[in-house]
Image (cartoon, helix red, strand yellow):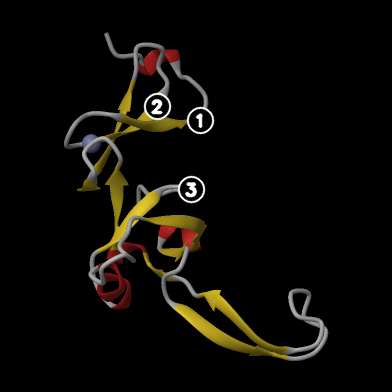
Amino acid sequence: MRIRKGDSVVIISGEGKRIASKPGSGGPYKVLQVLDGGERLLVEGVNKVHKHVRRGHPKSPQGGRLHLEMPIAASRCMYFCESCNKAVRVGYRYDTDGQKERHCRSCGASAGSIGKPRPQYASK
Ligand SMILES: [Zn+2]
């Protein structure tokens, strides 16, 4: 998957989609955490559950209920491009310095670079 922590995503199936279609509560949503090597995502405000916890839980020392997000399948999310203002597919490319970056396959806008530059991959 090409979605990373901090990205904005749109939910394309299931419960999150129903939230998004409600006026005033639409996406995009922020990715809080990427799990299982990119298979699953923790998305802010999507798939929230009341989790019952015992006393002594770091976030709830008294015990009780926590209202928190549970992971959803990454295949239910699509990257949201700010310049297109819609959900798009993401591609990888190398720039002229050999820096790998993600880009929007619709408008070509960069979605941030990844890792260290590798000059042997530099595009001309
Ligand atoms: Zn775009």
Kindly tell me whether residue 13 is visible in this rendering: yes
- Mark seen at residue 100: 2
* Residues under numbered marks 1 and 2 in contact, where contact means CB atoms less than 8 Å apart: yes
- Mark seen at residue 64: none
Q: Amino acid at mark 2?
A: Lys
Horizontally, is 27 left or right of 72 in the view?
left
Residue 83 quadrant: top left
Question: How far across and down, in percent of the image, does residue 35 sit?
Answer: 50, 62
Alpha-carbon span between mark 2 and mark 3: 18 Å
Q: Is residue 75 above or below residue 122?
A: below
Q: Is residue 92 above or below residue 61?
A: above
Which element carries disc 1, helix, strand or loop?
loop
**Residue placed most toward the observer, 102 or 29:** 29
Quadrant location, the C terminus: top left
* Label 3: how many Cα within 10 Å (few below 14, some 14–19, many 20+): few
Which element carries disc 3, helix, strand or loop?
loop
At x 80% / y 89%, what residue is drawn? 55
Q: Earlier in the sequence, mark 2 or mark 3?
A: 3
Residue named by callout 3? 6
Q: Earlier in the sequence, mark 1 or mark 3?
A: 3
* Label 2: how many Cα within 10 Å (few below 14, some 14–19, many 20+): many
Horizontally, is 54 left or right of 79 in the view?
right
At x 35% / y 47%, what residue is drawn? 2
Alpha-carbon span between mark 1 and mark 2: 7 Å
Residue named by callout 1? 115
| Mark whose residue sits in front, 2 or 3 | 3
Answer with the quadrant where ligand 1 appears in the image: top left
Question: How far across and down, in percent of the image, does residue 106 sit?
Answer: 16, 37
Q: Is mark 2 within 8 Å of ligand 1?
A: no
Q: Amino acid at mark 3?
A: Gly
